[in-house]
Image (cartoon, coloured by chain):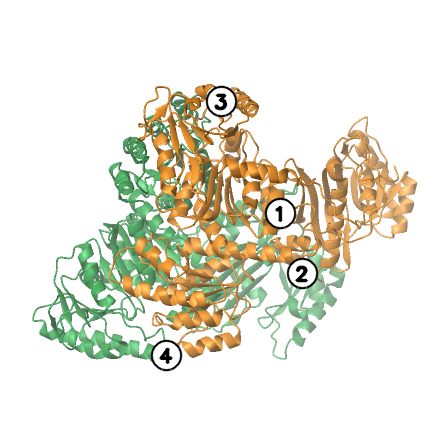
Chain colours: A green, B orange
Amino acid sequence: MTAVSQRPSQPASQQPAQSASLARLLTPGNVVIVGAKDSSPSSYGVVEGLNRVGFTGRIFAVNRSATPAHGLAAVSRCTAIGEPVDAAVLLVPAAAVGDVLDDVAAAGITTAVVLSGGWAEVDAAGAARQAELARRARELGLTIVGPNCLGFMNFAARTGAWIASVPPGVRPGTVAIVSQSGGIGNALVDLAAEFDVGLSHAVTTGNEAMLTTTEVLEYLVQDERTSTIALFAETIAQPARFMAAAGRARELGKAIVILKAGSSAIAARNAISHTGSMVGDDRIVDAALRQHGAVRVRSLEELVITAGVIARAGPLRTPGIAVVSASGGSVDIVADEAERLGLELPPLDDPIADGIRAVLPAFSTIQNPLDMTGGALGDEFEKVIAIVSRQDTFGAVAVLGNVPGYESCKVATINGLLATIGRGLRSATLPGFLLSQSIAHLNETGRGAVRSAGIIGLPGLGLGIPALAHLARWSRWLNQRAAQSGPPPVPLSGHPPPGLRLPVHGGALSEWAARELLRAAGVPFVPATLASSPADAARQAARFGGPVAVKLSSPDVPHKSDVGAVRLGVDAAAAGRAFDEVVAAGRSAGAAVRIEGVQISPMRRGGVELLVGVTRDAGWGLALAVGMGGVLTEVLADVAVRLLPVTDEDIGQMLAELRGSAVLDGPRGEPAVDRAALVRAIGRIAEAASRIGDRLESLEVNPLRADQSGAEALDVLLQLREAGATVDGMEVPGR
Amino acid sequence: MTAVSQRPSQPASQQPAQSASLARLLTPGNVVIVGAKDSSPSSYGVVEGLNRVGFTGRIFAVNRSATPAHGLAAVSRCTAIGEPVDAAVLLVPAAAVGDVLDDVAAAGITTAVVLSGGWAEVDAAGAARQAELARRARELGLTIVGPNCLGFMNFAARTGAWIASVPPGVRPGTVAIVSQSGGIGNALVDLAAEFDVGLSHAVTTGNEAMLTTTEVLEYLVQDERTSTIALFAETIAQPARFMAAAGRARELGKAIVILKAGSSAIAARNAISHTGSMVGDDRIVDAALRQHGAVRVRSLEELVITAGVIARAGPLRTPGIAVVSASGGSVDIVADEAERLGLELPPLDDPIADGIRAVLPAFSTIQNPLDMTGGALGDEFEKVIAIVSRQDTFGAVAVLGNVPGYESCKVATINGLLATIGRGLRSATLPGFLLSQSIAHLNETGRGAVRSAGIIGLPGLGLGIPALAHLARWSRWLNQRAAQSGPPPVPLSGHPPPGLRLPVHGGALSEWAARELLRAAGVPFVPATLASSPADAARQAARFGGPVAVKLSSPDVPHKSDVGAVRLGVDAAAAGRAFDEVVAAGRSAGAAVRIEGVQISPMRRGGVELLVGVTRDAGWGLALAVGMGGVLTEVLADVAVRLLPVTDEDIGQMLAELRGSAVLDGPRGEPAVDRAALVRAIGRIAEAASRIGDRLESLEVNPLRADQSGAEALDVLLQLREAGATVDGMEVPGR
């Protein structure tokens, strides 16, 4: 049996060409500012920004009156520049962009960064103007960045076309910033400078008339100068390409850290007004991001710090962190936050603890996190770091310490301690972090001390611990993925389903038809028969030898209970009457109701009831939801979500992450559920949904009943989308 | 009926004397450094810190060799100083502190700040040394701050005795920092400077041999220069005094913001090793803090920013916040985080929305949070701020904007916008905030711009939104409390319970005895009788006219089900046999089992089962826990906790905050529970527990069954503590 995928893979052949073209776009050798003007901060910002990154190319100025600007001679048209130019920054109003574009193209320029607003973000007329702009640009052989954006900076190559500001402290590195929003992109660059995170690129895409964040992401994943991508997005417009890029990032050991806005109702509404696109169900987005190893964060600060930490230290060999401190108060904050965030702080092995005990004063409590107490300020740090780094359940060492933030008489002492810690961390075989107590700004002395000690500095427990937790979780995910044999969506084991044919029409199937289709795909069901008359119903019920469920089977009555077309706990003697009742209830639902018969099945008692659903998300495809049935699902929305396909291991994790998961272990003295059988049953349901594929609208097995001896579906509702052809050669049997 | 309180109130007469003495202690007119030495950063730190806050008193140096230090002449003993000194900072090792203390006292000094470690934090011998130190100090008329602390700073009075460093940017204000941990105290002062939060005091108490955080808190609550207290604590050693101080703070409209470490298992273990005290059940601590209006935060940054915001703006007239922005991306982050944190962003009223529409471009989406789009950078801000501040569901206006963090060509533009925003916020009738996109450090230009615009700056969405959420929640709490008539612990309405006598011995009561005691206190119970023989049991069961529960009643078998001393769903015909079975089960539990009889009560079906428990916390007193029964409580630990006493409103809120709360509304087509009756029943249980008071060990009603027509207890377990006397005149009837 082979893996079932809903999404065609990207044609690999397109990748290199696109890559090369984006590499060219993001590395202009010279730049022209169209609309250059001394009084315009945007205009001067381009020059200032390029100067700050050490741009060595030429900058040209163009304005109607050919008035010099920023000390540059100016001409009135790009075609008058007289030499080839790579990129133009258009600071002109929206209404003038069209005319300027012709001039830009005529000058042989292939990239135009458009600052102006007033396009698709405004209204339908604006969207039409934007579409026309893109059409014209394509015709002219131009790529537009924006409109309504702040351009891009290529810090690695010391070039760009960036209308936002550039902080003096920014430095080249391997983190790339990508943001639809220009304002957010600018804030992220400022934060990178603040937190000493080195950047390869910053790209803002604005309205994405041509260049999209997805394309930029695809490029950066391949880019050799980039190790980690920090992405801010209100929507993920092309989920399939996003997932493919994430897969490639995984292969290369690169991380995508993402602040995905739009989890709230207000933000979802905003996103429509900004970009015209729906944000979709945030639970599905969240599941998709996690499944593809994207690190989801909640704030801009967390985005930059996490990307910086991963760029410098990730992935770890194992997710456990050793914490060493001289401050008891800080250790407690670390312990509390680590527990809350799921950051593993493994206990010290006995030989490691003994080693530490030999170094520290007798009264110290030897544990992880380790409080060395205020007295230990000498080379104990160096020794202890060396000792803990030998323990194989640790993937990194975090030292809590201070860094000078301002001039004071303590600076020399602190720097001495930093040097000791630095020696310890450098000689350790593990990545090491210096976790400052607070986020307070470091002055140049402090930065210098951290750099010269060769330490990865994390500013403040409040952001540093979450960043470490992200690094650890991402490392664990990457290691687990690497340990899996075969491609990521491992096929589910099982019997190959026989050929099934789906009906051509859309809408609901009867319970009986859905049941038989899923049974054929290996989903375990409660036994049932389809009775054709009251007498038949009574006969079938008697055969089951106990109370039965009597249910109408009709494609036109998907919600049988709502119309009274279900009778539960019926004795064989009453089955004939129940047959008549459910048929009558069905008929009362409408004249055209097709009745296939009445389904008879034995009543079940005990066990645990779950809900297993598969729904279609327009962008992300089919998503599997598993929840504890009854009150837990209905009241608490206690549901785990994954995109299809899933592995048995994924399903096991879904069950484990349910808040009511312990119900499966028989909390009230009842026997534990057969988890393996439950996982298999859910796997078959997921597999069947994947095989129905494009035709599937939704599938809900509710309840799926599990106990110590197995799992079986008690009811199912399957809704198809209209189609003209069979899919995957599946057929509906027994119609 | 009167309020029942478990805690004696503080004798008010002690307060002024203590206040005056602490005021004196925290305002030394001159200071001596004992152990002053040029090569010691701690020693020079005292001088540097005092200089930075503008101390105008004299600083003396003492060391054995009378070697000048920090440019000061030195003498070898305090008694040689030759003039009265207020405070001494002892930098000498622990072993030398005893001798120095005599000299300090002999010089007439009344305050000694002790830096050295090696006391109670080390081991039992250290604890004994510390106790002896305190005893000796008392004898000498000295107050010790510490040991193992960094002293205190009184920024409001520009004095102190502070061994930690003082950042250059720190400024006087009304936030007081209190921390057991010196290192944390120092980090908090650094953060206050970073975030431009003005300070009245910073006090670190270390091992608290004499001066405790509780005393400092009590003083600061009364201190006129302090409006808000930012407290870091690993333990709250004196809960009753803490709660009294919180009550006084509420009366004065002051806030206590607290980072209470120790919620994790590791931190709890650490706290014992640091301070020898237990942290207690964090859920009870959390409930106590919330009930007393203390604002609990998770990080040092959040502590300082929240305290700063409350000091400048709180309390708000109403908790709703209007958000105005020029950045769409930021607006979405605000919306997401507000939803996550429970920060109310009320929708715009129609007239307000119309007013805004008249000011903004036609294409803007008019809602709260308001995205004015990038085009609105002029006086629209001023106008819109004025308009939204007229809406009475808003208590504050937050404007998203940038502040210059470094020199660039954009600074003038940004400052112009800040001035516009500042004009708007100043003319508004509501407090206004400028919420920067990111936490990146502000340079002096940026700070100056915010200050000169008269704006309350919040650095970064990641910290600013939580701070606003805390401000709003605290304001709501304060307003609710102010709206309540009478004292905070409002008595529960109901019939006065008749006189009850409790047994003198401790341990469990039989179910029957506990039931009768609670019934007398007004708790509704399922009907029941106590049968004395099998025939009696059959007779009683027949009288109930349906299946009954048959349960042994014995004080010696508190967990009846565990030994098989309960039979459920018993028909009248089988009741006699059930009687014999449960009695036999009881006897098999031990020879000395006292059997009061067998309790017969009708079986109940349907409805919702809850668990209502009251437990005793050694520090905080009696705590009420209410949870949804069955799987929700057992598997999800879905329980709300409050200290007693509680009001009916508190109980209503407890039910509302249960994750399974919707079960009470009849989610599966069942009728909703009579919430008022349920609240009354829980109130009676809480009241009974309060009246049992000091004698109560624990009380558990499980289940308390509720349906559309009322609530009744089905079973109860009451455990008493040993005592020699009755409490509150209560008697146990019918023994």
Q: Which residue is mark 3?
A: B106
Is the residue B466 above or below the residue A236 in the image? above
- Both on one chain, marks 2 and 4? no
| Inter-mark Cα distance, 2 to 4 | 44 Å
Badge 1 crowding class, 10 Å Cα cut-off, few under 14, some 14 to 19, many 20 or more, is some
User: Which mark is in front, 1 or 4?
Assistant: 1
For disc 2, the chain is B
Q: Look at the numbered disc 1 and give the secondary structure of its residue.
A: helix
- With A503 as the anchor, is A157 left or right in this view? left
Residue under the point 35% across and 55% down? B447
- Measured from the top left, where is residue B261 in percent x and y? 51, 40
Q: Is residue B638 visible?
A: no
| Inter-mark Cα distance, 1 to 2 | 35 Å
In the rendered structure, which disc, 1 or 2, sits on the residue that comes first in sequence?
1
Q: Quadrant of the C terminus of chain B?
A: top right
Q: Can you tell which mark lies on residue B247?
A: 1
| Inter-mark Cα distance, 1 to 4 | 58 Å
Q: Which amino acid type is marked by label 3?
A: Ala
- Measured from the top left, where is residue A618 in percent x and y? 42, 67
Badge 4 crowding class, 10 Å Cα cut-off, few under 14, some 14 to 19, many 20 or more, is few
- Measured from the top left, where is residue B727 in percent x and y? 79, 37
Q: Quadrant of residue A349?
A: top left
| Inter-mark Cα distance, 3 to 2 | 72 Å
Q: Which residue is mark 2?
A: B665
- Measured from the top left, where is residue A563 in percent x and y? 66, 70
Q: Which amino acid type is marked by label 2?
A: Asp
Q: Are marks 3 and 2 in contact (CB under 8 Å)?
A: no
Q: Which residue is mark 4?
A: A124
Q: Outermost residue, front direction?
A: B82
| Inter-mark Cα distance, 3 to 4 | 86 Å
Q: Quadrant of residue A447?
A: top left
Q: Quadrant of residue A444?
A: top left
